[in-house]
Image: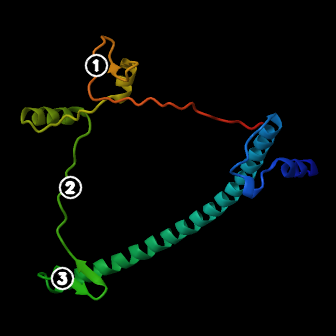
Amino acid sequence: MTELQEYLDEEFEPAEERREAWSIQNDSTADWALRKIREDERILAGHEETAQREIERVNEWIERMRHKAASDTAYLRGALESYMRGVNDVDPKRKSLALPNGSLQLRKDLAKWNWPETGEEYSALLSYATEHKLTRVRVELDKAGIKKACCITDAGQVVDANGEIVPGIIVEESQWLGFSLKTEG
């Protein structure tokens, strides 16, 4: 920061105890406030950049830890399954084993249903399902389409192109004007 900027900051910056009562009085104080915002944004961007580098380092570390844990777990899971299958070979009625730190179980897998996604098999399945009332249709509002096809009256009602009131929609108009600022440089 240059000596001029420091001087201007001292000249225009409100003291902490006066901050609530302080306000922009002229173009000079408005320009000072914009410069101060630009400086704060620059400082924050530096902090965010530093934080992002640290986040990336931590994410890389946790990913290595996840990979190691997954590898160790897969190895131990395989060893436990092999052990449980050996227990079941000795005693075919024994499908589970309770231990102090958990339990091991063998169970029959559920049948896997393979559904056709396209083609003649899908068409035949869809025809069968339709004929036996085993289909469903999902109906939902096309909100974007309603907004395009309708307009808002001065009374806050939504009407279509024919002037018919669309039921159930409540439009709340904002009474405030939006504000934005842009720093230069």
Expressed as whole percent of the image width and height from the top left, the position of residue 57 reads 63, 64
Residue labelled with disc 3? 89
Q: Is residue 159 left or right of residue 125?
A: right
Mark toward the viewer: 1 or 2: 1
Q: CA distance from mark 3 to mark 2?
A: 26 Å
- Is any part of residue 181 visible from this angle? yes
Q: Amino acid at mark 1?
A: Ile
Q: Quick one: which residue is furthest to the top in this view? A: 162
Q: CA distance from mark 1 to mark 2?
A: 51 Å
Please report the residue visible at 54 percent of the width from the left and 32 percent of the height from the top: 176
Q: Is residue 109 left or right of residue 146?
A: left
Residue labelled with disc 1? 165
Residue labelled with disc 2? 112
Q: Amino acid at mark 3?
A: Asp
| CB-based contact (under 8 Å), mark 3 and mark 2 | no
Expressed as whole percent of the image width and height from the top left, the position of residue 86 reads 23, 83
Q: Quadrant of residue 137?
A: top left
Expressed as whole percent of the image width and height from the top left, the position of residue 11 reads 86, 49
Q: Quadrant of residue 127?
A: top left
Please report the residue visible at 34 percent of the width from the left and 22 percent of the height from the top: 157
Count neighbours of disc 1 (C-alpha within 10 A) and say few if under 14, some if 14 to 19, many if 20 or more.
Answer: some
Q: Secondary structure at mark 1?
A: loop
Sequence-earlier tag: 1 or 3: 3
Please report the residue visible at 76 percent of the width from the left and 43 percent of the height from the top: 33
Q: Quick one: which residue is furthest to the bottom in this view? A: 100
